[in-house]
Image (cartoon, rainbow, N blue to C red):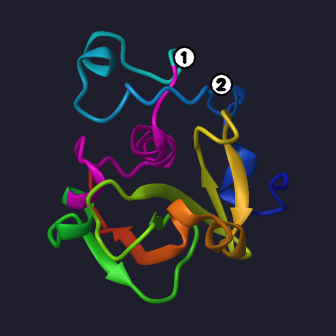
């Protein structure tokens, strides 16, 4: 775990985003998110990642991870990630139920997980050490004009 480095998008995030608690029931499209939008009441990894992107401009639909992975209209698969790309991880090769984070540079991914309970930046190797995140499915980049 580490704090953001100079020049990384994460340093420009408001304190409220860094204070977001992990709340698994607050996922994209959930009733709790529809009734009380924003991160103050918490988020799961997907909702958190989309709100981080929204802070910088790209707005994606309230997709679950498998919908994000399957999309080819608003996002594209990329082999070499850059800041603000989305990274998807799972225990195997399936996109359904995948964990989603935001690339912030220097091999770091900003994400929100139950294990930590608050937003954190991990290097890619840290995900590989955990059974539930051991498979990096890949990276998705919002296309220009998304949102």
Q: Is residue 45 magenta?
A: yes
Q: CA distance from mark 1 to mark 2?
A: 7 Å
Find the magenta span and give its range.
42-66
Question: Is the residue under label 2 in contact with that under label 1 (CB below 8 Å)?
Answer: yes
Residue 126 appears at what percent x and percent y? Answer: 71, 68
Whether residue 30 is situated above or below residue 137 in the rendered picture: above
Which type of secondary structure does the marked residue at label 1 adopt?
Answer: loop
Which residue bears the numbered disc 2?
A: 16
Residue 130 appears at what percent x and percent y? Answer: 63, 64
Res 18 label = none
Which residue bears the numbered disc 1?
A: 40
Query: Which quadrant: the N terminus?
Result: bottom right
Q: Residue at x 17, y 67 (%)?
A: 71
Q: Please indicate whether residue 2 sits to the left or right of residue 147 in the image.
A: right
Which type of secondary structure does the marked residue at label 2 adopt?
Answer: helix
Q: Nearer the viewer, residue 17 or 138?
A: 138
Residue 60 appears at what percent x and percent y? Answer: 28, 49
Whether residue 112 is situated above or below residue 58 in the rendered picture: above
């Amino acid at each position: 775990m580490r704090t953001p480095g100079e020049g990384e998008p994460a340093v420009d995030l408001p304190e409220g985003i860094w204070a977001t608690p992990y709340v698994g029931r607050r996922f994209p499209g959930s009733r709790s998110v529809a009734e009380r939008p924003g991160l103050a009441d918490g988020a799961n990894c997907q909702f958190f990642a989309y709100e981080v992107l929204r802070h910088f401009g790209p707005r994606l639909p309230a997709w679950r991870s498998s919908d994000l992975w399957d999309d080819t209209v608003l996002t594209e698969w990329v082999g070499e990630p850059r800041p603000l790309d989305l990274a998807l991880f799972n225990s195997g090769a399936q996109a359904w139920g995948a964990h989603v984070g935001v690339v912030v540079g220097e091999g770091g991914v900003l994400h929100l997980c139950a294990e930590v309970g608050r937003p954190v930046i991990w290097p890619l190797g840290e995900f590989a050490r955990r059974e539930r995140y051991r498979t990096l499915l890949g990276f998705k980049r919002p296309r220009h004009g998304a949102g």
